[in-house]
Amino acid sequence: MRQQGMNSQDNREHNRATILTLIRNHGPVSRAELARLSKLSKPVVTEIVESLISTELVYESYKAKSGVGRRPVMLELNQDHLRIVGIDLARTQIELTVTDLLGQCLESCKRELDTESPEILMEQILEALCCELRRVQTRHELIGIGIGYPVPLSTSGRIAVGTSAPAGWTNLDLEYLLGNEFGVPVLIGNDANVAALYEKWYGAASGFQDFLYIMIGKGVGAGIFCNGDLLLGQSGIAGEFGHILVNPKGAQCVCGKRGCLETEISLNALLTKAALGSEGTVSSLELLTAALADGQKDMERLLTEYSFVTGRHIGNLVNIFNPEAVIIGGDIARLEPFLAEGLGRSIDDTVYPMMQGSYQLIFSEATENKVAKGASVLVQQHFLTHPHKYISAFERISS
């Protein structure tokens, strides 16, 4: 995020974004302090602040105590109106999270949605999203919508999210469709990428510039940060870690190929093996956790094998990107007490000797939806960088 401005009329929007970001990060803050932090002149800061106050993005909260002279007036973001909805558009459900601009969750709701149903249509997915957003909109004034989604969203319906789709696939352009319907900016991103973004802003990765976020649940994905920025690639879906081919004769993957890594190390793949190894008695994550806690040898051997395979592939990513940290997220992180030692050993056995000990292995908190919250961060980040694109929405709310 921008932290310093530039004293030039040609950089008006840059300076506006800088001041808005500083108020968010340091507020309550005075105009004089904003000038010091931004390296902008006091007249430039005053002009920008007045424009932010006039659009009600910022307000004067109180006068600070001062030993001598005039007491400085402190500035804060107008959190009473700034509401963002983040959406986890998964293959089995929709989850919506309403946050303020500081990432505080105000409300969340879920709706079942099976995109792999043979009868699913793009119009049904769109209507389900619109229905939930309308319900949220009755309680909150929204200035932006963020969406995290898997690739692909539906193989049975051959539906992909984005502005373009492969030949023979249906394109679900949610930026355009929802933006038209609700009149606010809409930003979309791959589910692992937006979860990694949440970790960078608010979670386990907040202290790192270079890290790998490995998300393992029903699918497998990776969010990659290099020099503090998310690696997106040309199509915006860099990090499709789960679709590395590992066994051409393996199980069918949702992407249409056989033997992707996702078919080997996803939580579903692990639980399928656990059910087979226990004659059906261990068929959920909760039951697997209980079996491991009870010291069931068959389940311990299964997790040892899982740790070995998963660590090998993560270790190869470490060799490529040389991160400061590897963060394990998604539902698999709930197995940290039983997984951490073996997984760490397998990664270390795979990385170059000179890289051993150069990174931290961290298991993310697994009790909340990082995809929906990360989708909200997409909008927060965009708002702070391009505040002028939100002025019309905010003026409509204020009026």
Image (cartoon, helix red, strand yellow):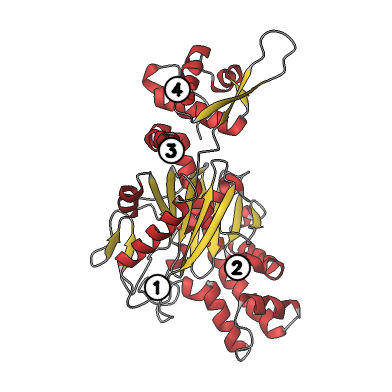
Q: Which mark is residue 221?
A: none
Which residue matches tag 1?
254
How far apart, in angstroms, are the residues tagged by discs 3 and 4? 17 Å
Q: Nearer the viewer, residue 220 or 157?
A: 157
How far apart, in angstroms, are the residues tagged by discs 2 and 4? 47 Å
Near mark 4 (Cα within 10 A), the count class, few <14, some 14-19 or many ≥20, is some
- The residue positioned 45% from the left and 24% from the top of the image is 54
* Earlier sequence position, callout 3 versus callout 4: 4
**68 vs 111: above or below:** above
Amino acid type, label 1: Val
Q: Which mark is residue 51?
A: 4
Q: Are marks 1 and 4 in contact (CB under 8 Å)?
A: no
Which residue matches tag 2?
332
Q: Nearer the viewer, mark 1 or mark 3?
A: 3
Which residue matches tag 3?
397
How far apart, in angstroms, are the residues tagged by discs 3 and 2? 41 Å
- Which structural element holds mark 4? helix
Numbered marks: total? 4
* Earlier sequence position, callout 3 versus callout 2: 2
How far apart, in angstroms, are the residues tagged by discs 1 and 4? 50 Å
Residue projecting furthest to the top: 69
Q: Quadrant of the C terminus?
A: top left
